[in-house]
Amino acid sequence: MRTSQPKTIRLSEYKAPAYLVDTVDLRFELFEEGARVHATLAVRRNPESTGAAAPLMLDGDSLKLEQVVLDGKKLAAGDDYEETGAQLVIAKVPARFELTVVTWIEPQNNTRLEGLYKSSGMFCTQCEAEGFRCITYFPDRPDVMARYRTRIEADKASCPVLLSNGNDVERGDLENGRHFVTWEDPFPKPSYLFALVAGDLVEKKDNFTTCSGRDIDLRIYVEARNAAKCEHALDSLKRSMRWDEEVYGREYDLDIFMIVAVDDFNMGAMENKGLNIFNSSCVLASQETATDLAFQRIESIVAHEYFHNWSGNRVTCRDWFQLSLKEGFTVFRDSAFSADMGSPTVKRIEDVTLLRTAQFAEDAGPMAHPVRPASYMEISNFYTLTIYEKGAEVVRMIHTLLGPELFRKGSDLYFERHDGQAVTTDDFVKAMEDASGRDLTQFRLWYDQAGTPVLTVSDAYDAELGIYRLTVQQDIPDTPGQTGKKPQHIPFALGLLGTDGEALPLKLESTEDAANAPTECILELTKASHTFEFHGLAQKPVPSLLRHFSAPARVVYPWTREQLVFLMSHDPDGFNRWDAGQRLAVDVIQSLIGAPEDTEIEPQLVAAYRSLLGDVALDQALVAKMLQLPSEAYLIELADSPDVAAIHRVRERVLGHLAGSLRDDLIDCYHRNASEGSYDLTPESVARRSLRNTALAWLLMINDEAGRDLATLQLQNADNMTDRMGALKALVNSDYAEERSRALEDFYEQFQSDPQVVELWFSVQSSSDRAGQLPQIQSLLKHPAFDWKNPNKIRSVIGVFAGQNLAAFHSPDGSGYGFLADQVCRLDDSNPQIAARLVTPLTRWKKFAPGYSALMRSALEQIRDKPELSADLYEVVHKSLEA
Ligand code: TRP
Ligand code: ZN
């Protein structure tokens, strides 16, 4: 905790470690009152580091140091070593030595959830990014890779299960009802991948035979009450293992792979070698308690963490500026996996929605940073949408530019060349270049320049010559600390449509044969402006631009509403069909903002939605996506100086108008998509439930009585959580106040013993402008199920309120901002990582219309003036006030 400015760490100041650690021998004595950690390190001077006899400097945080022994000799404080806040410094050490450090820590009082802590009575760890230093003194940086041996000793009754990375090599009983297990991990790893779990858990077992015929033990460890909720995660794991073999040629390397579910966890999950630790909400699922969305999330997170075994663990990051090396690549991998498991178009729509809503906002805000940042104060603040999602898009563009075969050659070379090493994003790109022979020099700018490129497209048709000219100009906006950016290398996929909706041949040369010309091409933009000519066209085409969202950019082109409606039903690219619908809805909504209340709502929008609702020939999963209006958050992101209340009002009005006009179609849609047979997760079934619940939500938007009765019935009879939540949500967002309270009460009554469902129950309320006004949010914080130590509960009430209940959060009196500021200050003392994440909505103050922004700013100042700000919160608050 601090009042002064935290230190800025710069990539340009990177130095190789002065000392390397070959092996780490750990012994944990776990007690109720704390834990004693004995760490014995085999250390040697790094031959590649300059400065021959540098002092040994080890990182530490919140440690009570009990003993330091060097080559068998006990060292004296002050004389032999110094403990300076965050470091243990030993001035004189030989070129090679053995060091033992004994520390005492208190996991039971650790509310930051970094290092070793307790969650629902079990001991667990979170070491990424810099949590290992909360366990023992260590060179806690990813370019120090060592082999670990870990002995855990604990009370046998309360901690029958003792886990760490690798294979268990020894176990036995000790005095006083205690026991021990020793684990050995044969693969050298950075400290951030260390993990330990000790508690009373049940084991769900499965197995997997690898491509080379090796048998792998798969185990999920959960509290006994969750034993029936592991099947989906285990199935997802097996599918991931198979997929990584088939698509990347990556085989699993240890004989055992374990997953543990933990209730209190700062993020989604963690890829510790051989022992992944998961937020319970990202692993536990049953038909009765998890929504389709949760099932899909679990599948992709299980895959993500598993894929890290190669992209992250076998090949790791040299330093934290390279975070996207593992995260961007791994998100790209898990996203391709999910696309293969379900509907690729729908998966693409979901990824792009997140990117355009949240990452574009980040890239346009005060914390904008490149995929490879140049500096940071607190690394926890850089686990961002830019590192993860934009990072994945950058890898995806390499995949697009190289094509699947050369990309695979590149990934093979990368894994082979760098196995066991800690490397940089540049090494990754180099492997792609070497394997493909392509020059990616300019492409590397994607890693260094922040900001979302804007592609402004204009066109002209020369009827006489039959030439269609398309001009694409790229501009990359200034971001904090970065101005005057260079043009980037952008793959720009497009197609052209004729009047009847036919895909026209794309002839970039007049001599080309139309019959052989492709109907989709990828133009490569490298200059500030390009003009492309398409030959042999008898009419002016309608352009379908940036197909499949081939680059993380904004496209500006003056499509007419007629053209958008046309693209919605004719574009062969499913993604662009969806995008055309989004653009049409955005255009309609934007044009109504500030217009008189009785301004007519575009009839083409109603007509387009009517034909969508009735289109049983089109992929129903795509229809379900196309029916979703752009979110308020996206509309705000697109606006220059958004008036939140006006956006909310107009969007609700359009939704109400659509629902009113399409009332009978919605009832039809509801019945047509009634649940059929038993619950399954095929894209068809998921789409069915999505369509039916959308219909319900719309009907209740207009307080339709038949809709209310359908919702009530569905709530009673549903055999799965998706339908139950669909009905509950619809009722909660209607004006049927009595039904709303009854539904909420009954639901809680029924599911109160299930934390994941209670989190859903909180979110339905905190995201609703009917049930989530500030006084109601305040009372949720006092609800017995709320827990200030549990990040999921905090997110489902405070995070959802500020991130999804936008009209209430941006209440014109500033009460929502003041509320968030109070909660952030309170949380900063117990869990700074969570506090710094929750404050995000306020940091975007500059974007908003003046009335809002002044109030947001003053809420931020209130936080800034709090005594003892964590480094996490300091960085975010100061950067956003000073940007
Ligand atoms: N590496 C983790 C992931 O794949 C991210 C993570 C989990 C994390 N827990 C964390 C990052 C705690 C920082 C702090 O996605
Ligand atoms: Zn990850």
Image (spheres, rainbow, N blue to C red):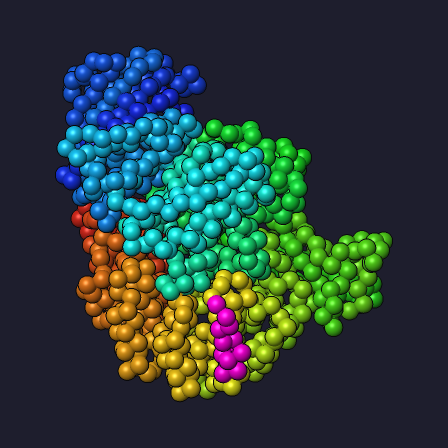
Q: Residue at x 63, y 32 (%)?
A: 434
Quadrant for residue 533, please give it.
bottom right
Measured as percent of width and height from the top left, residue 419 is found at: 51, 29
- Which one is in front, 105 or 512? 105
* Vertical order, 44 against 824 (above or below): above
* Vertical order, 16 against 575 (above or below): above
Quadrant for residue 542, please give it.
bottom right
**Magenta stretch encompasses residue 675:** yes
Residue 555: tell me if it is visible: no
Quadrant for residue 787, please give it.
bottom left
- Which one is in front, 358 or 224? 224
Q: Is residue 389 left or right of residue 491?
A: left
Measured as percent of width and height from the top left, residue 2 is found at: 21, 42
Q: Residue at x 60, y 57 (%)?
A: 548
Q: Which residues are magenta?
A: 667-678
Measured as percent of width and height from the top left, residue 412 is found at: 59, 35
**Magenta stretch encompasses residue 803:** no
- Which one is in front, 213 or 287? 213
